[in-house]
Image: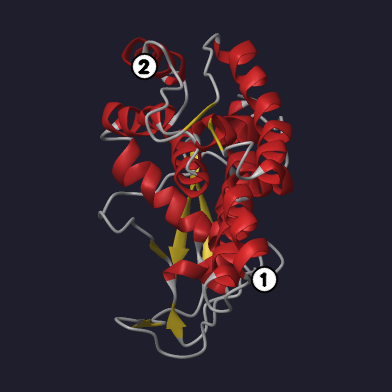
Amino acid sequence: MVLRSGRRWLSSSANTSGPVPHAVKKFYKRVSIKEMEKGYGIELDGRLLKTPGRNNIKIPSKSLGLGIAAEWDSQNEFIVPSAMPLMSLTATAIDQVLVEKDFVLDNICKYLNTDTACFLASEADEPRLHQLQLQYFIPLLDWFEMTYHLRLKPGFGILHKPSTNSLQDMHSLQSQLQSWSHWDLAALQCVTQECKSLVIALAFLHNYIDTKYAQTAARLEENAQIDRWGFVEGAHDYDVTRIQFRLASASLFSDFIREEEGNL
């Protein structure tokens, strides 16, 4: 199947018309997807695309295959990897998560000790932020406990410990997430790192919260600083665009995978 136009799949603010550091000039004219046994591949001028790790790409979802092909098709004179989030997540799933699943799970679950949703501002010093954090974080922590049978406590200060037995809780959560495919874990890793919260990431990928809620919850403290000190162009606007882009990408990637795997 030859792709005619992929711009409708996922909009990006990246400019692919000019050179960027270490940019590679576009070297292909035609992008297509190829049906394979139990999956789909991507072809550039009839040659199967590989990951940056030189591994073969076999995608379980036709929709994801079309989305990745659309990203390659939308490149202009230079190839801009940052404008291909579905391809990036696919490469991460194949090159990293598939071969180092336990390592990836361990790193993801370590966020329980520093999870954004577990740390509150002082009510005396920042009452408005404190109330917003309670409003957004408590429902997430309640959902997390109901879904994963682990209780994390919100608290104050850098010495706060969300879990009374963090090592046991980490192992319990790792065990529960072992059933997730390398595709699902690639999306989970992306959202967890962006939000600095495993609780927010899990709620988001389970469709308990939407993109706006996840973004707002992850940025409550930063938004409070903006209200206090002002908005810095070229910094805060970039952060907002980045989190919107990465959450939307991970959500779309996860939805495409679920078409074949079923819901989490």
Q: Are marks 2 and 1 in contact (CB under 8 Å)?
A: no
> Residue 111: which quarter of the image?
top left
How many callouts does the rendering have? 2
Q: Secondary structure at mark 2?
A: helix
Mark 1: few, some, or many residues within 10 Å (few <14, many ≥20)?
some
Q: Secondary structure at mark 1?
A: loop
Q: Taking 13 as reference, is 76 left or right?
A: left
- In the displayed structure, would residue 196 be above or below residue 43? above
Residue 44: image tag: none
Q: Residue at x 51, y 69 (%)?
A: 83
Residue 166: image tag: 2
- Residue 192 x/y as whole percent: 48, 40
Q: Quadrant of the N terminus?
A: bottom right
- Residue 49 x/y as whole percent: 38, 60
Which amino acid is tagged 1?
Answer: Arg
Q: Residue at x 55, y 62 (%)?
A: 242
Which is more toward the observer, 69 or 104?
A: 104
Which amino acid is tagged 2?
Answer: Ser
| Label 2 to label 1: alpha-carbon separation | 45 Å
Q: Which residue is mark 1?
A: 7
